[in-house]
């Protein structure tokens, strides 16, 4: 067969989100790849310029709807840096608890989509079933299931409800048992291993040169995690390991995310034990000083950054959002060339694309 | 009494009933009509005409049984899938019978959909491919008997076609051509890739399949179904030839295109594979035919390896045959929902590098058993 | 391939099939599948769930803070005529645009709006999704809220009764009250620092005119803007006092500003607006009502 360009997307049943991947195939082998993003651009950075600081928090939630609490928390951290607001300690512990729970939820959704792509329908349904447990916890805490609108500038919106600690500990122990069962389902099947081991190699130098961050980088041999290397919030007091692997193929990325879920459970247990009593919110000023605020956070998909410029009024002058997947997807040609069309799904699924934050 | 005599009796009774009216009409009308009517009536009651009509009736009965079984299969497939996924399957349509009428509801939905033919598609190929596919799949059922007395492909004395199994496998193997035709004629890159993959997969899995069946032919000493099942009255062929049974089941899964071998119509990359451009009931017929093929495959596996219709005499033979075919199908479903999809070059690798040597080993075992005179 | 454990050819199928077989057996024999048969069975939602709004007409003061903070411009104030409450303005919500974010609930100064657990709001026409205040009215929702906002007892000043006797400032143990002169009126007004107040109620007891009353006030976590008054431009028209929903503005006469009329009689003295900013909710209605630019609102350029 001659060489031809194939468009995978933008309307496609299983590309997660609205983007286009053009691959040039020679028979079944991929010769070139060009990702095209921008179909989901909603102008969020421009919308932020017309809203006051508290009004932007629901908007920041909708940047990446897969892990929304990370982004609203990141925005609040950036504005607190701008306004020099000191957050009470109980609020910091609640933030860490909810962020780690959000990390588990996001990784479970990734696993569901990944299993569904590979043809394993059971994987999709089982992981979504586990995710429901955590979404119910979030619902009792914040009042919503996906876009929570929970962090505020100066703390969190309201305190933990009664019985939350007991329910969370129960959910964590239930979840850890189930996670061990999933190893049977995924790694116990030779077909899964055949499709993942040795597929989609990303070498260490390529990953560093392209600016890839997050689990993709850690699976290629670089053990860089913002929670350990540049700690923010109360992560210095938490005791956990950073998951990383050396191979750089799809199986390594899968394994890194599974290990991260275990570590998140440990962090959640420690946060619940160490949480002090006290206030959970302080009043933040309405007008921001003239200046800039920057915050970086370890998003489940990589390193996210928000940069806020204030001009003395109650609306920001500029909000700049750095999304991890926007950078990772540009590394697609390096990972895809040389493999088969059937591998595209496994490889791009393994990168955990969320187009909401890519296109903003 | 076998099926042929049963249907012959019915047709004879029917033709006699009609002929009463016919001859009476011939008497009433004037003489030139009367002769004509008498001649027609005599022709209708003649043996040649009756046997042709009998064959039509037999085919109708077998096809209806097949279609009803296929509806059952689809229902099992969806209920099984539901319970494995930890939810209910079809539930409300036909509430009291566990949602069995969902199939009919889906069929009606497919009937009323708009059918769009792509403008640049090759009309002849596009319209002909489904016909070949469906026709050849139903043709497989012609030679598979349910028991010694229940089968279509017999002659007047009730003796079976001596090459029944060979014919069934040949009809099984026509499908790749029609899939390739459908994939190419739809004028779509995705369907082209799907068609090519499907053809490659089916071709490469025919060979271990046929080699395994060849070992069964060797042990039974003939190509006909009745002889093969008859030779299993002491012990089922699946027990000494268990390698052959496994290889046969895996090849059958690849032929019928179920997960883990369903790359030709993998949703993740190819939308629906080679059936993308077909809409409405045409798509429904493809789906239906895939289930007919798995039904036929299950029936083949039962007849060749699992003892056919032998079983305790409590339940009639035909029901035993169906029960065993259902069990084979259920095991397929369990396998389908537990495993991910295999990549296309890995599929071909499995077919040529692993299954072919196993089939050869199986053949050698069969030769050894036959030469020792145990069968 | 070398790193992964070597699995036999049966490893193709056996271990995953064990797990699905276990789920199958569980779903068939040992309990029901994990499904809620909506709409015949419904889930129990927690009380904090953010669904349809309910508005308590009696608590609401019509300040329109909720309308201003809504990120998506989903709310509007509607003028109504109520038999008990008279001419009032109450909010309505357009559920075609509402995000259910809950910011309107947090910013309300009197906890008059709340989100209930009702979420089945789908309809066939877009115009039917606009719920007016009458459809959202529920005057008894206090029992449905699980966590009231923090309340404090704080002194509230009625400026019309104050005689500037300065007894409250002397009595307060925390030195939270300072008497500030009001220009042109010849009196001074007690200004209370609410952060220092410890609710001891001594000022209420000592005031001879009962101008200071202790009331339950809800804690607010959003810093609301405050108006800045320019005496030079004030004409004493009283539009701001009529527009204010929270009784912040009092029109007081300025003695010595009477004009002499043509026939020798003295006219009425000029009035000026006096602001009791402890009660201000930051709605901005005074700013919008003043036609003479006597009130400055932060963030808005002239």
Image (cartoon, coloured by chain):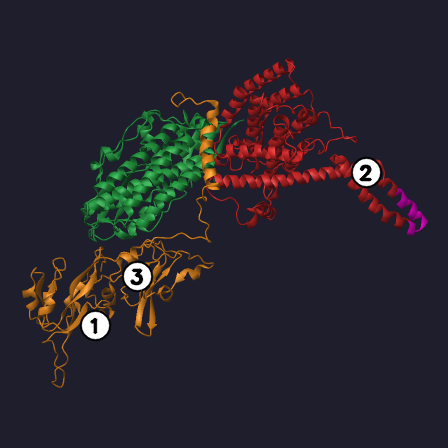
Chain colours: A green, B red, C orange
Q: Distance between the residues labelled 1 and 3?
A: 39 Å
Image quadrant containing the N terminus of chain B: top right
- SS of the residue under disc 1: loop
Q: Is residue A299 a member of the stretch shown in magenta?
A: no
Give the residue pinned by disc 2.
Answer: B50
> Is label 2 in a helix, a strand or a loop?
helix
Q: In which quarter of the image is residue C76?
A: bottom left
What's the chain of the residue with tag 3?
Answer: C
Real-space CA distance between mark 2 and mark 1, rounded to the nearest whole angstrom: 109 Å
In this rendering, do the residues under marks 1 and 3 share a single chain? yes
Dot 3 and dot 2 residues touching (CB under 8 Å): no
* Left or right of residue B300, residue B330 in this image: left
Q: Residue at x 71, y 25 (%)?
A: B163
Q: Mark 2 lies on which chain?
A: B
The foreground one among B47 and A114 is B47
Could you say where residue C220 lies in the image, as x and y percent from the top left?
22, 57
Q: Depth check: give the residue in front, A327 or C195.
A: C195
Q: How crowded is mark 1: few (under 14 residues within 10 Å), some or many (20 or more)?
A: some
First-in-chain label (1 vs 3): 3
Can you tell which quarter of the image residue A239 is in? top left
Q: Nearer the viewer, mark 1 or mark 3?
A: 3
- Per the rendering, the mark at residue C143 is 3
Query: In this figure, which residue is indicated by the disc labeled 1?
Result: C238
Q: What stretch is highlighted in magenta?
A: B27-40
Q: Main secondary structure of the magenta part?
A: helix
Q: Residue furthest right?
A: B31
């Amino acid at each position: 067969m001659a060489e031809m360009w194939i468009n995978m997307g933008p309307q496609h049943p299983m590309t997660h989100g609205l983007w286009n991947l053009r691959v040039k195939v020679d028979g079944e082998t991929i010769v070139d790849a060009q990702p095209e993003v921008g179909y989901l651009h909603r102008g969020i950075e421009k919308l932020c310029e017309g809203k006051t600081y508290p009004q932007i928090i629901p908007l920041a939630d909708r940047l990446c709807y897969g892990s929304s609490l990370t982004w609203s928390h990141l925005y609040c951290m950036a504005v607190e840096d701008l306004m020099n607001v000191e957050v009470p300690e109980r609020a910091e512990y609640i933030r860490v608890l909810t962020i780690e729970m959000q990390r588990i939820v996001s990784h479970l959704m990734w696993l569901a989509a990944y299993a569904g792509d590979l043809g394993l329908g059971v994987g999709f349904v089982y992981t979504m079933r586990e995710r429901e447990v955590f979404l119910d916890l979030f619902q009792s805490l914040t009042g919503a299931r996906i876009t929570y609108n929970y962090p505020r500038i100066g703390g969190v919106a309201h305190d933990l409800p009664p019985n939350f600690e007991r329910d969370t500990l129960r959910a964590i122990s239930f979840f850890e048992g189930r996670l061990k069962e999933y190893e049977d389902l995924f790694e116990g099947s030779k077909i899964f291993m055949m499709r993942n081991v040795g597929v989609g190699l990303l070498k260490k130098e390529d990953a560093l040169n392209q600016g890839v961050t997050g689990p993709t980088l850690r699976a290629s041999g670089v053990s860089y995690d913002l929670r350990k290397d540049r700690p923010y919030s109360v992560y210095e007091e938490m005791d956990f390991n950073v998951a990383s692997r050396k191979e750089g193929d799809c199986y390594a990325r899968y394994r890194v995310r599974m290990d991260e879920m275990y570590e998140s459970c440990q962090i959640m247990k420690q946060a619940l034990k160490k949480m002090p009593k006290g206030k959970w919110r302080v009043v933040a000023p309405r007008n921001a000083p003239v200046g800039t605020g920057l915050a970086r956070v370890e998003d489940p998909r990589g390193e996210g950054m928000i940069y806020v410029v204030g001009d003395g009024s109650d609306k920001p002058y500029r909000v700049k959002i750095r999304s991890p997947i926007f950078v990772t997807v540009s590394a697609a040609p390096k990972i895809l060339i040389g493999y088969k069309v059937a591998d595209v799904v496994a490889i791009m699924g393994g990168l955990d694309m969320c187009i909401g934050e890519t296109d903003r | 009494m076998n099926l042929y005599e049963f249907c012959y009796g019915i047709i004879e009774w029917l033709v006699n009933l009609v002929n009463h009216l016919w001859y009476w009409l011939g008497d009433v009308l004037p003489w030139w009509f009367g002769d004509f009517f008498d001649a027609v009536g005599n022709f209708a009651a003649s043996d040649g005409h009756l046997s042709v009509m009998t064959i039509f009736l037999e085919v109708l009965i077998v096809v209806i049984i097949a279609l009803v079984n296929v509806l059952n299969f689809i229902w099992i497939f969806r209920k099984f899938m539901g319970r494995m996924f930890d939810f209910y399957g079809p539930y409300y349509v036909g509430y009291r019978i566990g949602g069995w009428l969902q199939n009919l509801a889906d069929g009606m939905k497919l009937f009323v959909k708009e059918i769009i033919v792509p403008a640049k598609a090759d009309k002849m190929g596009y319209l002909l491919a489904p016909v070949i596919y469906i026709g050849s799949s139903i043709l497989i059922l012609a030679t598979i008997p349910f028991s010694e007395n229940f089968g279509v492909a017999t002659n007047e004395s009730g003796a079976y076609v001596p090459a029944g199994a060979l014919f069934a496998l040949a009809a099984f193997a026509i499908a790749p051509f029609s899939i390739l035709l459908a994939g190419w004629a739809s004028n779509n890159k995705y369907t082209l890739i799907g068609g090519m993959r499907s053809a490659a997969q089916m071709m490469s899995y025919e060979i271990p399949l046929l080699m395994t069946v060849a070992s069964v032919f060797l042990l039974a000493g003939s190509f006909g179904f009745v002889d093969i099942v008859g030779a299993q009255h002491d012990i089922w062929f699946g027990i000494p030839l268990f390698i052959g049974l496994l290889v046969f089941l895996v090849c059958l899964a690849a032929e019928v295109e179920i997960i883990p071998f369903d790359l030709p119509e993998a949703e993740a990359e190819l939308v629906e594979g080679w059936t993308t451009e077909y809409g409405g009931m045409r798509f429904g017929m493809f789906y239906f035919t895939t289930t007919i093929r798995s039904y036929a495959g299950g029936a083949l596996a039962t007849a060749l390896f699992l003892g056919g219709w032998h079983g305790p005499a409590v339940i009639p033979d035909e029901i035993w045959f169906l029960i065993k075919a259902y069990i084979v199908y259920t095991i397929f479903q369990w396998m389908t929902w537990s495993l991910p999809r295999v990549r296309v070059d890995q599929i071909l690798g499995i077919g040529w590098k692993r299954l072919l040597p196993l089939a050869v080993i199986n053949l050698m075992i069969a030769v050894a058993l036959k030469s020792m005179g145990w069968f | 391939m070398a790193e992964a454990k070597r699995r036999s050819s049966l490893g193709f199928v056996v271990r995953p099939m064990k797990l699905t077989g276990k789920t199958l057996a569980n779903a068939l024999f040992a309990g029901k599948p994990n499904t809620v048969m909506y709409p015949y069975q419904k889930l129990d939602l927690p009380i904090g769930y953010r669904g349809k709004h309910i508005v308590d007409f009696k608590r609401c003061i019509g300040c329109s803070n909720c309308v201003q903070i809504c990120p998506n411009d989903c709310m509007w104030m509607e003028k109504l005529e109520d038999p008990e409450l008279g001419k009032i303005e109450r909010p309505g919500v357009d559920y075609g645009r509402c995000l259910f974010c809950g910011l309107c609930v947090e910013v309300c100064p009197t906890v008059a709006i709340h989100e209930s657990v009702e979420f089945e709001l789908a309809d066939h026409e877009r115009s039917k999704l606009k719920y007016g205040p009458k459809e959202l009215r529920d005057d008894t929702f206090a029992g449905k809220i699980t966590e009231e906002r923090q309340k404090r007892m704080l002194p509230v000043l009625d400026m019309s009764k104050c005689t500037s006797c300065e007894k409250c400032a002397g009595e307060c143990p925390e030195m939270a009250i300072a008497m500030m002169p009001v220009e042109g009126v010849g009196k001074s007004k007690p200004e209370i620092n609410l952060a220092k107040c410890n609710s001891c109620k001594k000022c209420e007891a000592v005031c001879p005119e009962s101008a200071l009353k202790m009331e339950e006030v809800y804690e607010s976590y959003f810093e609301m803007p405050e108006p800045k008054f320019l005496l030079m431009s004030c004409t004493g028209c009283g539009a701001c006092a009529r527009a204010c929903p929270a009784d912040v503005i009092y029109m007081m006469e300025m003695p010595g500003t009477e004009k002499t009329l043509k026939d020798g009689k003295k006219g009425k003295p000029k009035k000026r607006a006096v602001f009791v900013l402890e009660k201000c909710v930051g709605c901005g209605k005074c700013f919008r009502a003043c036609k003479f630019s006597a009130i400055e609102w932060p963030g808005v350029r002239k």
